Amino acid sequence: MNKKHLLPVLSVTILGFLLIILELWRGDVAGWLTVFFTSWVFSGAAIILILSILFALFRKRYIACLIGLGFVVIEVILYCTQAFIWIDFYGSLSQREAFIESLDNPEVADGMISVPDQFGNISNGGNEVMIQVSSDENIDVKFYVLRGLLDNYSAFIYIEDNREFDNTKFVGDFGGLFYEVKKIQDHWYYVVSK
């Protein structure tokens, strides 16, 4: 490969890896750079990647185009995964809230329970939810989004009394510490376990 072909390939490869890193560690990068600045960096890198692909195509550097398009496909898949999570949340929110309303009785205990068929599939990976009842009788419910094979998972957690999410409270039965916690709306959090 001569030097004329090397620059487009390198620029597309570096930008592609930058975009993948930004997408995979978006929460951490946003913590370092702020959410506003992260979106500008992400948008700028995406625009430059697309322009690099077009430039490489115009200059007939097809290897660089293929590499760049591969990165674009990977980035779209990663971005769509996040979109599917939010579609899952809002698509089943009313059924999840109806299920939570059905738990308002004194016989509810801590532990994993199966969701009755009348509520549909509101927890992925077996339609089971984890319930935790606090000492003041508030109910917290974990609805699974993605369940790992051994111990990692992501979930939506409903906190009845709308207190701030306390990562240390959910140690033990509720699955340990979470490395990603996002508040979706009042009472609802999206979490990813370690």
Image (spheres, rainbow, N blue to C red):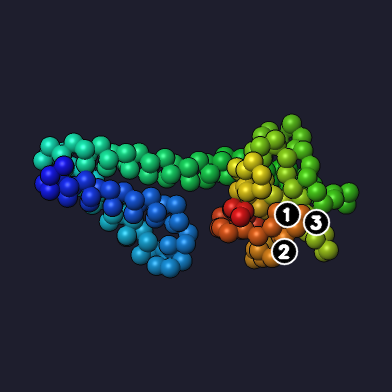
Q: Which amino acid type is marked by label 3?
A: Val
- Mark before the other along the chain sequence, 1 or 2: 2
Q: Residue 133 carries which label?
A: 3
Q: Is mark 3 on a helix, strand or loop?
A: strand
| Rendered position, 102 above or below 34 | above
User: In front of the other: label 3 or label 2?
Assistant: 2
Determine the residue located farthest toward the right in the rendered image. Answer: 107
- Mark before the other along the chain sequence, 3 or 1: 3
Residue 85 lies left or right of residue 120; in this view the side is: left
| Rendered position, 42 above or below 74 | below
Q: Position of residue 73 (x, y in %)?
A: 35, 38
Q: Residue 169 falls in which quadrant of the image?
A: bottom right
Residue 68 seen in the current view: yes
Q: Which amino acid type is marked by label 2?
A: Lys
Q: Which amino acid type is marked by label 1?
A: Phe
Residues marked 3 and 2 touching at CB (< 8 Å): no
Q: Which residue is drawn at 33% across and 43% down?
A: 71
Q: Which mark is residue 169?
A: 2
- Mark before the other along the chain sequence, 3 or 2: 3
Residues marked 1 and 2 touching at CB (< 8 Å): yes
Q: Where is residue 6 in the image (x, y as percent from the top left)?
A: 17, 47
User: In front of the other: label 3 or label 1?
Assistant: 1
Q: Residue 174 carries which label?
A: 1
Quadrant showing the N terminus:
top left
Q: Residues within 10 Å of mark 2 (few under 14, many from 20)?
A: few
